[in-house]
Image: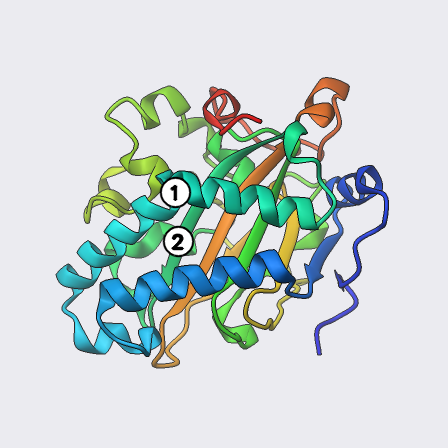
Amino acid sequence: MNSPFFQTELPADNLTMRQRVFDGTVFLKPADTASRSLVARVIGLMQEHLEMEDIRTAHLRWSAEEMFSRIGALRRIVYLEAEFHQRVRDVVAECGLDPGRVAFDPIRLRVVQPGGHRNPLAAPVYYPHRDTWYAHSQSMIVWWVPLHDLVPEETFVFYPDQLKQPVANDSEIFDYADWIKDGPALKIGWQKRDSGITARYPGSLEKTMPEHAEGFSCRAAEQLIFSGAHYHKTLPHDLERTRYSLDFRVVHLDDVAAGRGAPNADNRSRGSTLPDYVQP
């Protein structure tokens, strides 16, 4: 049972829902037709590319290099192909957003392997951060969708008291124009094995973490909907199974025009990702 911090019912009025997200509410919405269809499609592709049914144990079959190559190909598919752009529109429409007023950063496939926190190449995965430190709009809303049922040790934690409070960080190192100058590899994520060392990922400089943390469990195809300004951190785990999830970022253009969004407590990143979002 998750804490009351995670709300399960979206307000009927979508503007109200978005404003609540900007104010810090995190929704954990039950799976629906669109999210189940998306998860089933991605799992099917993964089973095909990984040549096995139990994809959560693929790290036991394939070498790190082979796993990276196969997952990299899948990441390109779900991020670039028109089918998955339409699936984003289907998911947000089922949650009450008008796809004709929504721009989005496409789907990213996330992979957190057991013991991954001990791999220097994967270090940025575990940095405490706000997504807005990557030059995203304060109007951005994040959709996060697990491919399987997950226990709290496999997910991540929010530090809700920090939504409006600055934390020490190095977000000023992030320049979006520099990030994309060599092509889309960093946008898609983990297309080069040494990116975790050679690329400059912004993160927290705090020496201790806040005491108040909110973690959660979830069911496959549920939808975690939250502000990109929330301070959060992926948890390391050693549970002998790989965690797979999908996420994408949405900006309602009416919110941008009206200046609605989460508070900017400490984001100093440069540039803007919004012109490169998939537009309505």
Residue at 42% over, 48% down: 108
Residue 160 drawn at (x, y percent): 70, 53
Classify the position of the C terminus by image quarter: top right
Residue at 30% over, 44% down: 76
The residue that mark 2 highlights is 109
Estimate how packed mark 1 is, as few (under 14), some (14 to 19) or many (20 or more) residues with alpha carbons within 10 Å: many
Lateral position of residue 204 relative to residue 189, left or right: right
Q: Callout 1, which amino acid?
A: Tyr
Residue 272 drawn at (x, y percent): 50, 22
Determine if residue 137 is in view: yes
Lateral position of residue 257 relative to residue 51, left or right: right
Residue at 59% over, 28% down: 137
Determine if residue 231 is in view: no
Depicted 174 relative to depicted 126: above or below: above
Q: Are marks 1 and 2 in contact (CB under 8 Å)?
A: yes
Between the C-alphas of marks 1 and 2, the distance is 8 Å
Closer to the camera, 189 or 229?
189
